[in-house]
Image: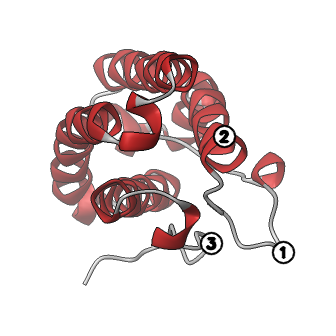
Amino acid sequence: MPHVVETWERMPVDAGLSADLSDVLRAFAETEDEIVHLGVVADSARMHELLALRRLFVEQFGIVNAALQKEPRLVQNADLMTQAMRLLAAFRSRNAINQADWPVIRVRDDPIAYREASQHVKEASRIFWQWTEDALGIRARNPAQSLANRDARIV
């Protein structure tokens, strides 16, 4: 069973979001958390798992995009939709560049440099998840832990 960092409070459906978007964001966050964990531990025996999770994460960016575009609350508010698409696109592009620059074998060989090089992804992630909390009312974090204190956020 994969290790999941237990810092995310999963998105409540009663936040005014559809169950579909809530479920999609939950799965997306769980995958990101697991990638972060594997990137931090950089265990050679788990690099295939990291590779598989990275591929899944890329697919999930598309799934999140589609779910956001169908979300009634966003469909009814063009400004919110634009913000959602812009922030997700920034997160997605930074993640893609990071994955291209840091194949799994490099992550394994130099995890410290990987964490340093992943700061731009960490920032895009933080901004996206903060936006989901501020704009959509999703409590993305355990109240005892702030998004600003999220450390080792790498993808």
> Which residue is more in the foreground, 52 or 17?
17
User: Which residue is the site of mark 1?
Assistant: 144
Q: Is residue 68 above or below residue 42?
A: above
Residue drawn at (55%, 29%), measured in percent from left and top? Answer: 118
* Image quarter of residue 121: top right
The circle on residue 7 is 3
Gap in Å between the C-alphas at discs 2 and 1? 20 Å
Q: Residues within 10 Å of mark 2 (few under 14, many from 20)?
A: few
Residue reaching furthest front? 76
Q: Residue 97: x and y, percent?
A: 38, 15
Going from N to C along the chain, the mark reached first, 3 or 1, is 3
Q: Which residue has dot 2 on it?
A: 135
Determine which quarter of the picture holds residue 57.
top left
Image x and y of residue 53, in percent:
23, 52
User: Sequence order check: which comes first, mark 2 or mark 1?
Assistant: 2
Image-based side of 101 in relation to 60, left or right: right
Q: Label 3 crowding class (10 Å Cα cut-off): few <14, some 14-19, many 20+?
A: some
